[in-house]
Every structure is written in structure tokens, then in C-alpha cells.
Amino acid sequence: MKIKGVALIMLAAVGWGIGGIIADILLDKGWSPIVISLYRGMIGFLIFFAWLLLRYKAHWCVTARTYIWPLIAGIGVAGNSTFYFWSIQASNVPVAVTLMYTAPMFVLLISFLLRIESATWFKWNCIIGVLSGVILLTGVYKPDSIIVGFSGIAAGLASALCYALFIFSLKKASANRKPQFTLTVAFFSLSLVLLVFTDFKEGAAVLASADIGWFFLLGIVGAGFSFILYIAGIRLVSAATASVVAMAEPLIVSLLGVLLLGEAIAAIQLLGMAIILTAITALSLHRSF
């Protein structure tokens, strides 16, 4: 059962990684990050809604209060995906996905501020490790020849902060609710939020464009089935195992970015990525025990 759980989470990570590559292709074709994120969210919503209908049980108790955390989770994932795509546009896929995976650091800092967790030397060392890795990854230590521009760094860290909000809200929402309900409401919230900021002419143009297949593939692989596989996987393994296996996504995305998109990664950036992923993995393992 444990091997099956690991395999499902690994497949989910591969799906998210492929989603990042598809988003990069669509960005190169001139589509905006908001429109790409909107279609990913709407298609994901339709998949989760169908899943909800298939698993619906009449005795499920749904009140107004049960919608609050899923709605907040939707706002988090809306910001996460949009800023992630902006970061890809301003830098490249490997840098963007690695910056996004600094999210556990923000979760920890928020936990410190809210006094949910106590600060320890180990946790602060992990945070320092993440920040050191970000410095090497982006090249901010050499302002005159910075590797990644400020907009790419800001968008990447903003995606991580939104991802942290999504993780926190999803955990709260899933405490007493079925995952089908939580994901359906969250992605419905995502779609509503992004509709407010979407250029409707560009959004409508997608339906008549030759790229519509890419958008559907992004929603199906990069949202719908990846989340379903992940949820199925985490039921079979521990939280520590799930967090470590999910770290495969940055590595998968980086490999796909180099092989399929020809994106170059400097040796110093690889060192920064390794430091970030090591620190985040150590932090995740420490907090799971």
C-alpha cells in the first residue's frame, strides 16, 4: 500500500510538472498568466464537480460555515497559479517552481507569528538555508549581473506565499469535509476570483484558438487528475513521506525544462536549488514527527 501511495504522489508531481511546461508553452504563444490560470482552474473545477457528483451522499452535512475555508483555499490557489505563471514568464520554469516550493518556509513564519509553533534553532537554520538557496538561485548577490530579475523573484515568492495560504486553508477545510467537496468549492472560488481580473476578449479568444487543446490538457493534467492522484496517495502514506515525494516536482520540472524547452541552468543555480530542496525536505520531515 505504501508503494502504491508513493507512486500516486509521484504521478501527481509529474502531472504538476507537465502543467508548468504547458503553461510555459502557452506563455510563449502570447497568452496572459491570468487567462492560463483561469482555464486551468475552470477545467479543474469541472473535473472536481463531476467527482463530487459521483461520490455524493445525501447525508453529507453542508452549512454556510463549511464553505469559508474552501473559499479561502480557492483564493490561495488562484494567486499561487497566477503568480507562478508570471514567475515562469519573467524567469524560467525551474526557477519559478523552486521559488514556489519555499512555501513551507512561509507557513512556518506565519505559525511563529500566530504562536502556533515555537521557534527553534533547527527551524531557523532551515529558513536561513532556504534564503541562502534563493540568493544563489536568483543571483541577487551580484546586482550588476543578476540571473533572475526582481519581477521573477517577487512573483515566485508571491506564488509561494499564496501556496502557503492554500495549504493552510485546505488543511482546515479538509478536517471535517470530503476532499471532493473541498476541491470543488476551492476551484469554483478560484474561477470567480480570476474572472474579475480577466480580459474577457482574450478569455473568449481561447475558445476559438488553435491552442484550446493545450488549455484543456493543462486543466486535466496540471489540475484535475494531479490533485485527485495526490489525495489518493496521501491516504496511503505518512505526511512526511508525502511531503518528500512531492519535492520531486521541482526536479521533474527542471529536467523537462532543460530537455523539452532548452532552458539553461547555471551551476550556481543548481546549487541554490539543491540547498532549497534539502532545507525544505528537512523542515517537512522535522514537522511531521
Image (tube, helix red, strand yellow):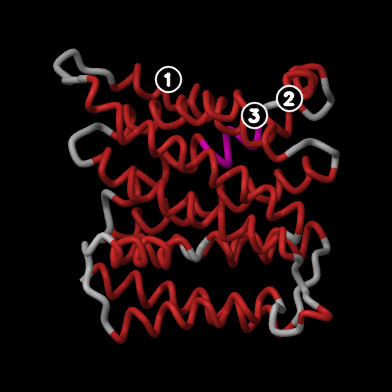
Q: Residue at x 35, y 74 (%)?
A: 283
Start and end of the magenta stretch? 217-223
Expressed as whole percent of the image width and height from the top left, the position of residue 270 reads 66, 79
Q: Nearer the viewer, mark 3 or mark 1?
A: 3
Q: Main secondary structure of the magenta part?
A: helix
Q: Which residue is mark 2?
A: 199
Residue flagged by tag 3: what amino acid is it?
Answer: Phe
For label 3, count other residues whose C-alpha is less than 10 Å away and answer few (under 14), some (14-19) or many (20+): few
Query: Earlier along the polypeptide chain: callout 1 or callout 2?
Result: 1
Q: Relative to residue 234, is residue 133 depicted above or below? A: below
Q: Residue at x 67, y 35 (%)?
A: 34
Task: Work out how far the residue at label 3 is from the one at label 2, CA to CA, in angstroms.
Answer: 7 Å
Picture quarter with the N terminus: bottom left
Q: Which residue is mark 1?
A: 50
Residue 19: within the magenta? no
Tell me which corner region of the image, top left, top right, bottom left or bottom right, holds residue 279: bottom left
Q: Which residue is mark 3?
A: 197
Expressed as whole percent of the image width and height from the top left, the position of residue 210 reads 84, 26
User: Left of 191 or right of it: where is 260?
Assistant: right
Residue flagged by tag 1: what amino acid is it?
Answer: Ala
Query: Earlier along the polypeptide chain: callout 3 or callout 1?
Result: 1
Task: Work out how far the residue at label 1 is from the one at label 2, CA to CA, in angstroms.
Answer: 28 Å
Tell me which corner region of the image, top left, top right, bottom left or bottom right, holds residue 38: top right
What element does badge 1 sit on?
helix
Residue 221: within the magenta? yes
